[in-house]
Amino acid sequence: MAFHFPKKGNTLETSQKMQKNHTMQSIEFTQQDKDGLYKTIFNRRDVRGQFKPDLIPKDVLARILTAAHHAPSVGFMQPWNFLVVESANVKQQIHHAFTEANEEAANMFDGDKQQTYRSLKLEGIKEAPINICITCDKNKAGPVVIGRTHIKTMDLYSSVCAVQNLWLAARAEGVGLGWVSIIKQQALHNILGIPKDVVPVAYLCLGYVSDFHKEPELETANWRKRLPLGEQIYFDQWQQTRTGEEEPLIQALNDNEKFVSQYKK
Amino acid sequence: MAFHFPKKGNTLETSQKMQKNHTMQSIEFTQQDKDGLYKTIFNRRDVRGQFKPDLIPKDVLARILTAAHHAPSVGFMQPWNFLVVESANVKQQIHHAFTEANEEAANMFDGDKQQTYRSLKLEGIKEAPINICITCDKNKAGPVVIGRTHIKTMDLYSSVCAVQNLWLAARAEGVGLGWVSIIKQQALHNILGIPKDVVPVAYLCLGYVSDFHKEPELETANWRKRLPLGEQIYFDQWQQTRTGEEEPLIQALNDNEKFVSQYKK
């Protein structure tokens, strides 16, 4: 039997197939995989009060940071840095800056609301064994970044996605995390030596906890209720709520309490 | 035996315990749960090119939106709305606005880079059966919001956390998602009727896909490499890299390829 060179068309097809196999995948997600994700999402809490002093093992911390590093980023710029704070002295300075800002903040609320505000514990800076400041370096990939040409805040949003990945990974690892936002950005620049073109996006406190709250603390404290999801959805235009063909979706959304609560047991 | 009223101290203790049981939980996360989360995080991709026209069932969409609605938000303000776009006419207008911005964007790159830029498919607006614009309504919880008093962008960051939750839930459900950021915010306001005080944070394209890319497309296209995570970590001060006691962490971080790749099979 004579040896035949493959026809040109076939070669191309094979090459495309190989290319496809090289770059594509069809991983299946099992119900268990989905359950793991939803369980994490619905049980994630903003932790301020239950930190234990136990150190977070380096391999756990490495997994959490790796999850953060695999966040989406505009133009694949990966604008984040992770400034890990363990020094008691630095924490003390951050705590001082928080206290100053928090006093200003409390005075912005009136009467009962101010009293409730002052009763809330809003940070765990000193108790948490580790604090992490996640930043956004606007110059990390040069001045022109694909995808950031028209919405300049896209790089900040990328760093926030890293925060959320880190937060979820921490929860699944049993590590509590609290985001401290009552602080002046300039104080974070000064205390941590962060340059002008780098934005401190999030200051986070991490540590193992005695327990997690079942529901957000501000909800339990009657500060604010969870909004009905069905009412947050519009169709095709702002404030356009449809009751016809979209009714099954709205119905499914309003029935979602059962879906969520199965993961809280 | 005489009946004793419990001592006052005991009553208080019991009441605190009940309170604790009511609000606290100690859910364990199994290795399977963690695997589900990490698998999702490491296989999430920004999808532009493999959308299939198949409709997303309402119960799947409801789960994805519920995940988004359980994102963290500053002051529990839940500043997001979800504007679901299915109208071909609206998609067409958005696509037009993208094309205009994309032409401007391409011209910002020089030579080879511009050629590569023009070869990239950067959106799936019309092919994706559903587009979702996630917004941030700055007035959703009144003018003074707990936690937003000093960092005014915190509400935007909350909406971004909703984007990331939605993205991860979509991936686990087998739904591809692409974030279109090459568009003028004003165009989103105009086309979708979004008011001035509401920020269109993210315009997303969603749909089932023929396959997912193994790696980010910009990485495969040699646009930009994934940065070594160990080099993105500082300790206590900006640019302070320690080689002593932190060596095990840096080592663990640089070894993370194996950890990630086990979830890509």
Image: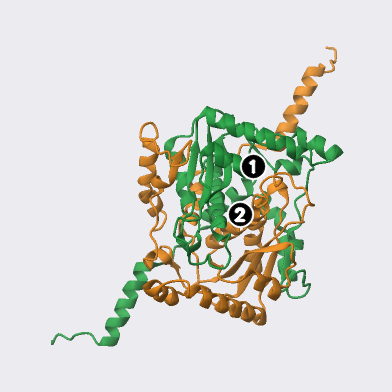
Chain colours: A green, B orange
- Amino acid marked by disc 1: Lys
Are marks 1 and 2 in one subunit?
A: no
In front here: B141 or A172? B141
Q: Position of residue A93 (x, y in %)?
A: 58, 31
Quadrant in the picture for the N terminus of chain B? top right
In front here: A211 or B122? B122
Residue at the extreme left: A1
Q: Position of residue B179 (x, y in %)?
A: 55, 66
Residue B20 against residue B151 in the figure, above or below: above
The subunit carrying tag 1 is A
Quadrant in the picture for the C terminus of chain B? bottom left
The label on residue B161 is 2
Residue A112 against residue B50 in the figure, above or below: above
Q: Position of residue B187 (x, y in %)?
A: 65, 73
- Amino acid marked by disc 2: Cys
Q: Residue at x 24, y 87 (%)?
A: A7
Q: Residue at x 56, y 39 (%)?
A: A190
Which is closer to the viewer, label 1 or label 2?
1
Q: Which residue is mark 1?
A: A184
